[in-house]
Image (cartoon, coloured by chain):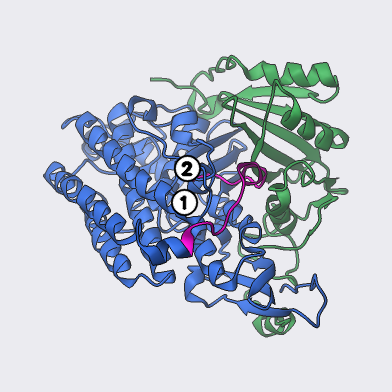
Chain colours: A blue, B green
């Protein structure tokens, strides 16, 4: 699909094909590397091996049906994808979500951020040769997935966040389970830091590798931990608060070195901040209360009402056969996913199916900076640089 | 409970227009004072400002948005297209800009006709427009003048048509893609 025009003359350099089936590309990413000895002269990423046309499929589904498709884009952050899509539809409709549902959403999304960072840390470390961190990270991620299973009945593709709220009431005994996780996790993060932060091999592989200046990062539209490691404190949770994030007390960790090591430190610090947010959200979630807003014709009615009220039965039938029709217009919503600014743009033409659904996926746009990171570096550092951007190919290709 | 935005024709509710956000018109006024034609049409919907820019002025307006001390939209966060087929002009390009220092967002919009879907690339203003515009070229077939590397990005190079256009069926034109042919063409190395 892609050819490399050699920059320094064909006799001296060689072109090496990395991927699409390469363990450290975290999926099916192909990179064409032009090498001069061990130095990368030019890098051309080649994408699209996982393109499934999710945006096109959304146009053929009603607004509620498309939620399950969004889970499958960034499969390490399905709840965040649900959240951004549902918030865009709610903005289009002008719906307000009950506070209790907003806090539940915040708690779930922050747990998801920790689990996503754990997968990132484990796979990044295994790419650079630290095997044991991977096993520890996945052990803790399993605990988070068990919490999701408790709440939603699913471990990964939960579709738990719905238009107007969340799908189910929190299950009995959820506080004990989350509390146990919150007690355990800080010492586990300490363990990872003990293994890596001062590890000489780890520092040698990551310090000073993959530098990008703050100006270049913003010009290349980078967001998320990669931008914050360059010293720009741009976090949607603080800058454009959504889902009641303005009521939570947390810091946005930044570094200024802007190398792989700084990005590692930022993400580890983010895990600790997320734990703080989960604890605050837990305190805010009351035991009783609504989990969905009430909007007949848009939000499916309660099961008991359907048995007793005729209107509820009619609305239920209409919602699931025809769907609902927002007024013509557009809405763009952006949240802070573990990888950066995850945006959702929906255009409605007044029919029950969206005219256009577009996801601004942070992996796709951050990956654009990969050539900038690795050109001039050694070939062994390519793996470190791919890992440090934290891409999910399901989201890159959509 | 607010009932805004629900299609009044079908549900019988009143559509309430939300009031414009405070700094919404700063952008439009600053652009108008620079060039009266730049902000030809300004709409406010759901607290989002959309500025419709004439096609010829897109790159200059974008550069102004980035460099003007009152605007400072230094981050091009997203670019996408809406196809309103069969209405002409059918394409609507939406550029979502963020000002990190000013904490503001704005949307620039350009309308393009189906006969001549060409517009100036924003790559000289924000290098990050590179892949965003390649994706639009790939999926909608809109060409960008001055783009350094306008190739398909998500689909194979020999793909026929632009699937996100509204006149392209969801299930595609062919049941079975000709994989053997695609593989031969794509194995360049």
Is residue A341 or residue A43 the one in the foreground?
A43
What residue is shown with label 2?
A: A255
Q: Quadrant of the C terminus of chain A?
A: bottom right
**x and y percent of residue A15 in the render?**
70, 79
In the visual, does A2 lie left or right of A260? right
**Disc sitting over residue A121 in the figure:** none
**Callout 2: residue from which chain?**
A
Q: Is residue A172 magenta?
A: no
**Callout 1: residue from which chain?**
A
**x and y percent of residue A350 in the render?**
59, 35
Which circle's residue, 1 or 2, is located before the other in the chain? 2
For the point 35% across and 56% down, the residue is A197
For the point 48% across and 36% down, the residue is A235
The region drawn magenta spans: A205-224
Q: Is residue A208 magenta?
A: yes
Q: Are marks 1 and 2 in contact (CB under 8 Å)?
A: yes
Query: Furthest-front residue in view?
Result: A200
**x and y percent of residue B58 in the render?**
81, 36
Is residue B67 or residue A295 the one in the foreground?
B67
Q: Is residue B135 above or below residue B66?
A: below
Mark 2, Cα crowd under 10 Å, few <14 / some 14-19 / many 20+, is many
């Amino acid at each position: 699909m892609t050819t490399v025009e050699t920059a320094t003359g064909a006799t001296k350099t060689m072109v090496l094909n990395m991927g699409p089936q390469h363990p450290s590309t975290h999926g099916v990413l192909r990179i064409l590397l032009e090498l001069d000895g061990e130095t990368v002269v030019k890098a051309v990423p080649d994408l699209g091996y996982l393109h499934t046309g999710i945006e096109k499929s959304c146009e053929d589904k009603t607004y509620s049906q498309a939620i399950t498709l969004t889970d499958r884009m960034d499969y390490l952050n399905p709840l965040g994808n649900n959240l951004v899509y549902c918030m865009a539809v709610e903005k289009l409709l002008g719906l307000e979500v009950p506070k209790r549902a907003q806090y539940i959403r915040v708690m779930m999304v922050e747990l998801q951020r920790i689990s996503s960072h754990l997968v990132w840390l484990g796979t990044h470390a295994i790419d650079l040769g630290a095997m044991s961190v991977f096993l520890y990270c996945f052990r803790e991620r399993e605990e988070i997935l068990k919490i999701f299973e408790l709440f939603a009945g699913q471990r990964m593709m939960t579709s738990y966040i719905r238009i107007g709220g969340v799908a189910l009431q929190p299950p009995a005994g959820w506080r004990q389970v989350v509390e146990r996780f919150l007690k355990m996790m800080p010492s586990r993060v300490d363990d990872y830091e003990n293994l890596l932060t001062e590890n000489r091999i780890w520092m040698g592989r990551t310090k000073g590798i993959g530098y990008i200046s703050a100006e270049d990062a913003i010009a290349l539209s980078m967001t998320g931990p990669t931008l914050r490691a360059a010293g720009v404190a741009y976090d949607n949770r603080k800058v454009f608060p959504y889902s009641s994030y303005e009521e939570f007390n947390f810091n946005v960790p930044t570094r200024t070195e802007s190398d792989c090591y700084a990005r590692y430190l930022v993400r580890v610090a983010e895990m600790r901040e997320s734990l703080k947010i989960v604890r605050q959200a837990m305190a805010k979630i009351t035991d009783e209360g609504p989990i969905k807003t009430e909007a007949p014709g848009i939000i499916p009615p309660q099961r008991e009402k359907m048995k007793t009220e005729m209107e509820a039965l009619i609305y239920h039938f209409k919602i699931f056969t025809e769907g609902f029709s927002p007024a013509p217009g557009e809405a763009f919503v952006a949240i802070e996913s573990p990888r950066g600014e995850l945006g959702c743009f929906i255009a409605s033409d007044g029919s029950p199916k969206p005219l256009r659904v577009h996801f601004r996926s942070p992996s796709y746009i951050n990956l654009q900076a990969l050539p900038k990171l690795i050109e001039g570096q050694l070939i062994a550092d390519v793996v470190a640089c791919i890992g440090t951007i934290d891409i999910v190919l399901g989201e890159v290709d959509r | 409970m607010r009932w805004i935005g629900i299609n009044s024709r079908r549900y019988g509710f009143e559509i309430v227009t939300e009031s414009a956000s405070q700094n919404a018109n700063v952008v439009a006024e600053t652009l108008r004072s620079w060039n009266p034609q730049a902000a030809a049409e300004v709409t406010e919907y759901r607290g989002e400002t959309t500025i419709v820019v004439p096609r010829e002025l897109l790159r200059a307006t974008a550069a102004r948005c980035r460099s003007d001390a009152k605007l400072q939209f230094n981050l091009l966060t997203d670019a996408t297209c809406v196809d309103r087929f069969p209405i002409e002009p059918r394409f609507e390009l939406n550029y979502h800009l963020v000002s990190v220092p000013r904490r503001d967002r704005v949307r620039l919009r350009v309308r393009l006709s189906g006969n001549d879907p060409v517009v100036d690339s924003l790559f000289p203003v924000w290098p990050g427009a590179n892949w965003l515009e390649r994706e639009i070229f790939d999926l909608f077939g809109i060409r960008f003048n001055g783009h350094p590397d306008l190739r398909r990005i998500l689909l194979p190079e020999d793909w026929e048509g632009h699937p996100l256009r509204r006149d392209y069926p969801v299930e595609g034109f062919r049941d079975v893609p000709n994989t053997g042919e695609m593989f031969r063409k794509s194995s360049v190395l």
